[in-house]
Each structure stands twice: as C-alpha cells, then as structure tokens.
Amino acid sequence: MAGSGREQAYPLDDAVRKSPAYVYIVQAGDYIKIGVAVDVVKRFSIIRIIHNNTFNGHVARLRVIGARWLDAPYYHEKRLHTTLSGWRVANEWFLRNPNVMCEVYRFLDGRRQP
C-alpha cells in the first residue's frame, strides 16, 4: 500500500513452511491483509505498530476478521493470495469488496480448501 512500511520477507526452510500455523485475515478500512502466524495476537500488534494505524494515507481501525489453524499454512496462504490476485493492492494487502469477502469467509468456514 502506498506510503506504508514494507515488511521484510525471509526465506523459510521446508520444515517451517509445513509446520502448522494460522492463516489470518485482518481488515484496515477498505483493505484486508492475509498472512501466516503462530501467534495471531502478537502478529496483530506488530501490524498495528508497523502501519501506525495508517493505511494508504488514512487512519483506519485494524480488526481481525478471522483465522484458521492449518498444516502447511504457507501453501494455503499462497493459494488464497492467487485466488484474490485481481484485487491485490500491495504484497499481502487486498481491496476489501464483496467478491474478496465471499472468498475470505468461504476459506474461514472451511468450505474452500485453497
């Protein structure tokens, strides 16, 4: 997102990629972020600090939409990112709209296995 801090991506070894973790979705105004974390509460706090509650130049309340505990979470995260790629605004951030939210809730409900 324009003007937001960039998060550093670190290469992960195969064991870490396959270890269980949450695929989480957070919302900030008109945007959602899809990521992976073992501790969603801690990750939520880090996101808030990184972006200082400012998203795309506007103050926005940050909230957790949901999370799923999964084996091989990075695989599931990547598949969801690919499904929503038409609405990507930057990195793991996507424009919040009815199509995106439909896919997000299907994923969270377990009706969609990416």
Image (tube, helix red, strand yellow):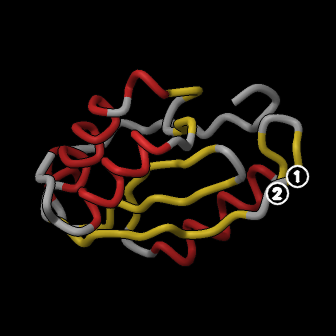
Nearest the viewer among 79 and 6 is 79
Nearest the viewer among 57 and 22 is 57
Residue drawn at x 67%, y 70% is 45
Residue drawn at x 25%, y 57% is 107
Q: Quadrant of the C terminus?
A: top left
Vertical order, 95 against 53 (above or below)? above
Vertical order, 53 against 45 (above or below)? above
Q: Secondary structure at mark 2?
A: loop
Q: Quadrant of the N terminus?
A: top right
Vertical order, 85 against 73 (above or below)? above
Lateral position of residue 39 relative to residue 52, left or right: left
Per the rendering, the mark at residue 59 is 1
Residue type beneath disc 1? Val
Q: Which quadrant of the structure image shows residue 30?
A: top right
Residue type beneath disc 2? Asn
Instruction: Tell which circle, 1 or 2, labels the residue nearer the N-terminal end.
Output: 2
Residue situated furthest top in the rendering: 86
Q: Position of residue 23 (x, y in %)?
A: 33, 60
- The reply to whether discs 1 and 2 touch (Cβ–Cβ < 8 Å) is yes
Q: Secondary structure at mark 1?
A: strand
Q: Which quadrant of the structure image shows residue 64?
A: bottom right
Q: Which quadrant of the structure image shows residue 71?
A: bottom left
Residue ID for mark 2:
53
Nearest the viewer among 110 and 8 is 110
